[in-house]
Image (spheres, rainbow, N blue to C red):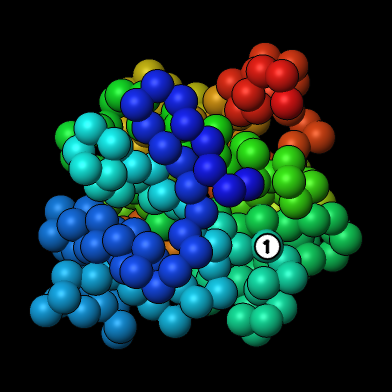
Amino acid sequence: MTSATQDSFVVERATTDAMIREAQRLRYAVFVEELGGDGALVDHDARLERDRFDPFFDHLLVRDPARDGAVVGVYRVLRDDQAAAAGQFYSEDEYDLTALRASGRRLLELGRSCLHRDYRGGPAMFHLWQGLADYVLEHEIEILFGVASFHGTDIAALAEPLSLLHHRHLAPEALRVRSRQFQRMDLIDEAALDRRAAMLAVPALIKAYLRLGGTVGEGAFIDHAFNTTDICLVMDTERMNARQRGLYVREGT
C-alpha cells in the first residue's frame, strides 16, 4: 500500500522520519495532553509521544487535504518479521503471546490508534480502517492483535465492561493470550450484569473490533504510566463472517 484517496482524506504509510514525527505529534495531543499518559521517551518540549518501538513499526497516516494535509488519524502496525527485528512485539511487555506465536500464522500487531478530536465520530476512522485493510491484504496477515485501553486505572469503575468482555468475548483457547500482571476481568457474575450499561462503557475502538469478530485475552493489565487499563484484542480473519468482512475490506478488493 502506498496511498489511497477517498472523499477528502488521504491514507498513506510514513516513509520518512518527518512523517513519523507527524504521527507522534498527534499521539502526544491525544495520549499525553488529553489522557494524561507519559513514557520514558516522550518529548514534552517537542510534543512528541514516542517509544523505542517506533523505528520498527509501519505508521499509517490519515491526512485531511482541506486542512493543509494535516495528519488527523494514525495507526502503527508491526508484522511478525518486524517484531523479530525488534526482539519482541510491543504487547509482550504486558501479555504472554505464546499462543499466537505457536499458531504458525501471519501476525500483525496494532497499536497507538487515535484521531484528532475534531474528527471523531466521522469518516476519518473509516478511512484509517480501510488503509489497515489494504495493508492486511498486501501482507497476507491472518491474525491481528494489540493492546486497547480503557482510560483510568480504577478497576472498580471498570468492573462492568471488563466482566462483559470476559464473559461474552473471551478468545478461543488456541489464541488466548494472558496478562503478565494478571488483573481478573470476571469481576461481576454474568447473570448480574446490566449488559447495555456495560457495553456503553466500552470504548468505541474496542467495540469496533468486537463488531469485526474480535475477542479478548485473559486478564487486564493496569498501565499506571499511561493511566490506562489495557486489554489485548485478538482478531482471526478466518473467523470473520461475510458481513464483518464487508465492514473491513473495501468492495472490489
Neighbourhood count class around disc 1 (C-alpha, 10 Å): few under 14, some 14–19, many 20 upward: many
Q: Residue at x 34, y 73 (%)?
A: 50
Q: Residue furthest right?
A: 104
Rendered position, 64 above or below 59: above
- The spot of residue 219 in percent (x, y) is 53, 57
Q: Residue at x 30, y 48 (%)?
A: 71
Q: Going by the image, does 25 lie left or right of 136?
A: left
- Of 86 and 19, the residue lying toward us: 19
Q: Quadrant of residue 170?
A: top right
Rendered position, 42 above or below 233: below
Rendered position, 103 above or below 225: above
- Of 6 and 240, the residue lying toward us: 6
The amino acid type of the residue labelled 1 equals: Arg
- The spot of residue 173 in percent (x, y) is 77, 49
Q: Going by the image, does 96 lie left or right of 75?
A: right
On the rendered image, what quadrant is the C terminus found in? Answer: top right
Q: Residue furthest top?
A: 243
Q: Residue at x 13, y 60 (%)?
A: 33
- The spot of residue 87 in percent (x, y) is 65, 84
Residue 187 can be seen, yes or no? no
- The residue that label 1 is drawn on is 79
Q: Going by the image, does 115 lie left or right of 139?
A: left
Q: Going by the image, does 90 lie left or right of 6?
A: right
Q: Residue at x 41, y 49 (%)?
A: 61
- The spot of residue 241 in percent (x, y) is 74, 21
Rendered position, 78 above or below 3: below
Residue 57 can be seen, yes or no? yes
Q: Quadrant of residue 19?
A: bottom left
- Of 233 and 130, the residue lying toward us: 130
Count of all numbered marks drawn on residues in the image: 1
Q: Secondary structure at mark 1?
A: strand
- Of 67 and 218, the residue lying toward us: 67
